[in-house]
Structures are given as structure tokens and as C-alpha cells.
Image (cartoon, rainbow, N blue to C red):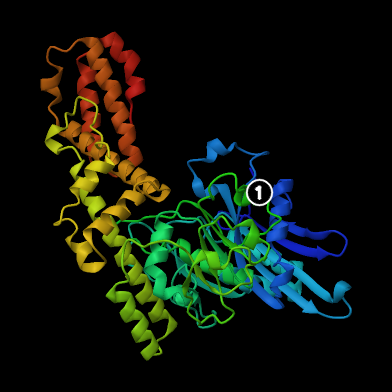
Amino acid sequence: MTNEISSWVSAVAVVNFDLELGQSIEHIEPSSFLLTEKERLNICYLSFPDSNSGCSGDTCYHFRVRKDYSLRESRDMMSSQHENQYYYGYVFFRQVKGEQFKRGYFQKSFVLLTKKPYVNLFSNIVQITAPQFFDSGQVAIEVALHNFMSWGEITPGKSYQVPLLGQVLAFHIPSIKDKGQPKPKEFPNHALAPKPLVLRSIFECNPYSTLKPLLPHISILWELVLLGEPIVVFGGSPKETSSLVQALVSLIAPLSIMICQICIRYVNDYRPYFTIHDSEFQEFTSKTHPPSRVILGVTNPYFGKALQHFPHLIILDSDPDKQLKILNPKEHVNSSLKGKPGFYTRYKPHLVRDKQIKKLLRTTNEHQRPSEVEDIMLRRYLNELTHTLVIPLEQYISSLMPLQKTINPFRQPPLLQPFVPEHFIAYLTETVLKVNIELKGHKASWRDLYRRFLKSSNFEYWFTQKRLEANKRLEMLHIQELGDSDIYSWMKDKHEVEIVDMLLWIRDRYELLRKYDSQSNLKEDLKNHIKTLLEVIPSDLQTNLKPAFTLD
């Protein structure tokens, strides 16, 4: 146990810069929260911008750091829970110049640690909480902790209206069952209650403005992220890099929107802000093996040499509205990351820039639209692009489902047939690809893109989830067939051992049904089958078995 505050927030830390000691955690709540020495050092360095960033005043950003399992569960035990391997840190850094301070500056960071990638939600939380801490001290943290613990558990599909230091936040936790993008539920307010701060998404912060310098190349970036290509983002501050890295990760999987339960998720590593002091620095900068499949946000020019082996580099311009051009990576070799802003890559895209993104760029230049509208238009475009990719995959997986008529209630349920990449590529006929040709490119281009995608971690994760979903559906169909079966006909001429085996089998199906669907009417059918089977076995065996087959 790590003694976390709640399911929302793991801990709140105050990180100070000491002239003799450097960065150190000055205070952490709860005080019993466990951090290894490696985690402490990583969090301390990530909580401060690099000295060359020149951040003055208040700066907000976030980072993602791998947990250290030396004092906890082994990493193997956690491998099935990908997101639980990381902490997300939401930072409010304050730097104030003054002669009364050592080194002439006051430098301190307020850091909120959590396991949740709810970037927009927690960025708003830290921007509410940190200023009150700097004004009022420890009491602000104590009140915030009390608020966090009052929010209840995190429930997908639920809308929340929660208190935070005299303000009210309203937001929705998305669920795969949501249709479209649900808005936070409207709650009637008391006349004296503060007006809620309504968040349209708990995940994304202004994706359009963040990606604006790269909009002409958005389909190329979409391909790179889809395939899990290594990317370095260099910016002038952690705020710039963390915003863009997060926007890149969400290109293929808008986490706040699920379309017909189709979701491709970015599962490779990504670090919105990364420093040369990180414990994994050697792992990412080693040139003895191919670059890690990671998206790194960096601000230290030293990474210009350390990450030369990364194939894709984005150097942001100091003008956030200036569009970046695609440049040859040779132009920045042996130069620092302070070089010419641009998108350095040799990648040859499989798809061409289509009419939709050209129209979006043209109309944006012609009209000044609200940022919310631009975000929606960009998200719709990316949704359609991802949706287009997934449709043939969904159709092919449907063809791998065994027919319902082949399900025998008295045998093991069938499983989804194996996914064979060569068979899928052959399945991509002109008819199947018609929707793709109309939207984004040529048949050969899509086939080549699919060939590469099928080898990626993103596809592996997506297909694993689809296989689990399909096999669950087959199990439910099998249970339905079992519930509707004629148990009297089956048990004719059956030996006692076979009947006992069937009793155990039906009980196992009953427990599975409870796990999948506690409200199902099929439970009564299975109970009746058990009752019928118990009646035909010898009375002494009945006495011994009945307690084990008394189902609630």
C-alpha cells in the first residue's frame, strides 16, 4: 500500500530549490505516502524547469514518470495494468525575483501526483489549489485533501460536480458506453452557491491551438503515432513540450470520445517533460540499440546530441502561431536543439494530405472561430481518420467469429479464430477499401500502412481488447444456449460421474454469468438445471453436494 489520498489524487508535494541541496521535497501529504529514493529524485528534477528554460512568474505543466518497484510489486505483476506503472505529476512552478532571496530568486513547485492521465481536469485543479497554497500556506493543502476525499470513487459514465477550495468543478468521466461526447450533467445550483467551472473534457487542453504549427502535417503525425515511431519534441519550456506531447498521444485515440466502442489507444511510452537527470536517461539515449518507441518532450539543448539517433524531431518556434515546415534531419545533425524550428523527418507518408484538412486550414485563416469550435473540427477530422482505419479491421474480426449454430451448450465455448495478417491484407479488396479510397488515399498505400500497423504495439493492445470482447460475447452466447437447452434429454443414459461433471460445469458458467451480467434472467435457468441434475443422483451424494450448489 502507498497510503494514497484517494482514487483521484495519490499525493500532494511541495518541492523547493535549496542553494546547498538543490531540488528537494519540502513537504508531502499524506506524510505516510511511500516513495523510493529513485522516485523522489525523478519527481524533484521533473518538478522544476531546466535552468535554460527561463521560466519566470507562474508556469504550469505536467510530467509522467515510471514507478520504481524495488519496494513494491514486481513489474511483471503490474504488466497487465499499463497505466498503473506510472505517476502523473501536475506542476505549478513559481519563480519570483527579489534581493531578499538567496540567489536572487524564490523558486518552489506545488505538485499533484496521481495515477490518472486526466490532463485537463488536474491542470485546472492545480491552478486552483497552488495559488491558494502560496497565499495561505499549509491550510490550503489540508482543505484540498478533505475535498478530494469527499469526491467518492471514480466511476466511468458518471457526471460529477465537486467542491474544491470554495469553487465547484463539473465534469464527466467518459465510458465506452457513452455516445458521442457527453457534456457534464447540469445540476441545479443554490442561489448562493458558486457557479461551476464546467470542463468539456477531462483529458484535452486546447488541442487545436497546441497542434496549430503542425496542422499541415497532421496526417503524417497521425501515422507516426499510430505506428509507435520514436519522436522528440524540443520546446522553450516544459509547458510547451508537455502540451504538444499530450496532443500527439491523443491523435489516434481521442480519450474523451469513443466511437461505436472503437478505440485505438497509444500504448507506447511517452514523457511530456524529460530531463537529463532522469533515472531512465541512459536507456533512452543509448545508441547501442534502436531508439525506444517513445515520445519525449525536452527543453535542454544537450539532448540535441544525446538523441541524434531518433528519426523524428520537432523543434518548436518561439511564435506559437508560426507553422513549421518539414526539414531534412541532416540539417540539424551535429547542431544543438536551439537550431532552426521545424519538423525534421525522412518519413514517407502512406496517405496524402486530404481535402478535409486543407479545408480546415483555409477556413481557419478566413474566419476567426471560437477555440472550442476549432477543437471540435480538428477532433472530428482525427476521429474520422482513425475510424476509417478501424472499419476494415472490425469487419474482418467479425468474419472470425464462429457461427452461433456451431455452439454446443454441453461443450467448451468456441473462441475467436486467429488473426492472420496475410489473410487480412488479402481481405482488403476494392469493395472493403472503397471508403478509404474516397477519404484518404490509394489502395496500395492503405495496405502498406496496415502491414506496418499490424506489427505495432498499438495494434497488439487494440486486438487483445477486441479478442477479449469477442470471446466474452461467445461465452455469453454459450451460456444462453446452455440455459435454453433440454437438460432432460442430455442426462438420459449419462453416468453419475458425467452428471457431477455437468453440475460443476453449470456452476462455473453461473459464476461467470454473475461476473458479466448480474441482472441476467439466465441465472434462474441455470439454477433449475442444477436442481434437475441433483434430483437424479443418489440421495447420499445429494446430501454431500447440495451445500456446494446452493447459489444466491
Q: Is residue 157 visible?
A: no
Q: How many marks?
A: 1
Instruction: State the residue at coordinates (45%, 56%).
Output: 155
Amino acid type, callout 1: Gln
Q: Quadrant of the rendered structure where residue 432 is?
A: bottom left
Q: Quadrant of the N terminus?
A: top right
User: Which of 309 and 488 lies nearest the eye of the viewer?
Assistant: 309
Task: Classify mark 1: residues with Cα within 10 Å, few (<14), some (14-19) or many (20+).
Answer: few
The residue beneath circle 1 is: 282
User: Which of 469 and 156 lies nearest the eye of the viewer?
Assistant: 469
Q: Is residue 221 visible?
A: yes
Residue 470: horizontal and vertical position, in percent? Answer: 27, 42
Residue 515: horizontal and vertical position, in percent? Answer: 35, 39
What SS does tag 1 mark?
Answer: helix
Residue 478: horizontal and vertical position, in percent? Answer: 21, 34
Q: Quadrant of the C terminus?
A: top left
Q: Quadrant of the rendered structure where residue 411 is?
A: top left
Image position of 466 (left or right of 86): left
Instruction: State the residue at coordinates (28%, 56%).
Output: 390
User: Which of 302 and 414 lies nearest the eye of the viewer?
Assistant: 302
Up/down of 244 relative to 25, above or below:
below
Residue 167: horizontal and vertical position, in percent? Answer: 58, 75
Image position of 514 (left or right of 425): right
Instruction: State the residue at coordinates (37%, 74%).
Output: 378
Image position of 189 (left or right of 390): right
